[in-house]
Image: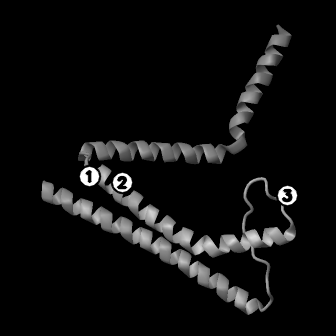
């Protein structure tokens, strides 16, 4: 029983590490695609990024470009750290899940499934979720006026 559990744990850990590696490699591949497309363009483009909150109306165009350059300088390091953080979180979850019994894992999977289904249905409904309540209120108002 324990051997089977350990095999599953190792398999889950390996699978998680493969996913993290694949995501990391995918983001690296995207970076080279961006670089290639910029090289093909031949024109010198302005650096792009995202200004910190409330900076848009305060900084000059020159400062904006400098901020974007600073962000670009640290982008690779931040991506690498994010990948490390993701790997540590995956390892942590693996150890936490190792504490659970098979029955507990099934319950958690079921709860996650229900939550995902609820999210999907609420996204599909979108603004329609508010409309039936408004319609009901209008109907109730009409009924009160007629009485």
Q: Position of residue 55 (x, y in %)?
A: 79, 57
Q: CA distance from mark 2 to mark 3?
A: 43 Å
Q: Is residue 91 above or below residue 77?
A: above
Q: CA distance from mark 2 to mark 1?
A: 8 Å
Q: Is residue 1 above or below residue 70?
A: above
Q: To which quarter of the image does residue 9 belong?
A: bottom left
Q: Count neighbours of disc 1 (C-alpha within 10 A) and say few if under 14, some if 14 to 19, many if 20 or more.
A: some
Q: To which quarter of the image does residue 22 belong?
A: bottom left
- The quadrant in which the C terminus is found is top right
Mark 2 or mark 1, which has the lower sequence index?
Answer: 2
Q: Nearer the viewer, residue 3 or 86?
A: 86
- The quadrant in which the N terminus is found is bottom left
User: Could you tell me how many numbered marks the image carries?
Assistant: 3
Q: What residue is disc 1 on?
A: 98
Q: Residue at x 76, y 28 (%)?
A: 135
Q: Residue at x 47, y 67 (%)?
A: 83
Q: Is residue 103 above or below residue 61?
A: above
Q: How is the image coloured?
A: one colour
Q: Is residue 119 left or right of residue 16?
A: right
SS at mark 3?
Answer: loop
Q: Is label 2 or label 3 in front?
A: 3
Mark 3 or mark 1, which has the lower sequence index?
Answer: 3
Q: Is residue 23 above or below residue 123?
A: below
Q: What residue is disc 3 on?
A: 58
Asked if marks 2 and 3 touch (Cβ < 8 Å), the reply is: no
- For residue 118, which numbered disc appears in the image? none
SS at mark 1?
Answer: helix
Q: What residue is disc 2 on?
A: 93
Q: Count neighbours of disc 2 (C-alpha within 10 A) and say few if under 14, some if 14 to 19, many if 20 or more.
A: few
Q: Position of residue 97 (x, y in %)?
A: 30, 51
Q: Position of residue 59 (x, y in %)?
A: 84, 62
Q: To which quarter of the image does residue 71 belong?
A: bottom right
């Amino acid at each position: 029983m324990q051997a089977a559990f350990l095999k599953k744990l190792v398999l889950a850990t390996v699978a998680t590490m493969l996913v993290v590696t694949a995501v990391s490699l995918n983001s690296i591949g995207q970076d080279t695609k961006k670089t290639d497309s910029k090289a093909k363009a031949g024109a010198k483009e302005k650096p792009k990024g995202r200004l910190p909150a409330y900076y848009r109306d305060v900084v000059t165009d020159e400062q904006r470009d400098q901020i974007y350059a600073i962000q670009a300088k640290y982008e690779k390091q931040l991506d690498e750290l994010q990948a490390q953080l993701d790997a540590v979180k995956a390892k942590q979850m693996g150890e936490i899940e190792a504490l659970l019994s098979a029955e507990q894992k099934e319950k958690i999977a079921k709860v996650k499934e229900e939550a995902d289904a609820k999210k999907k249905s609420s996204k599909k409904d979108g603004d329609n979720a508010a409309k039936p309540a408004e319609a009901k209120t209008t109907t109730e108002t009409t009924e009160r006026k007629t009485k």
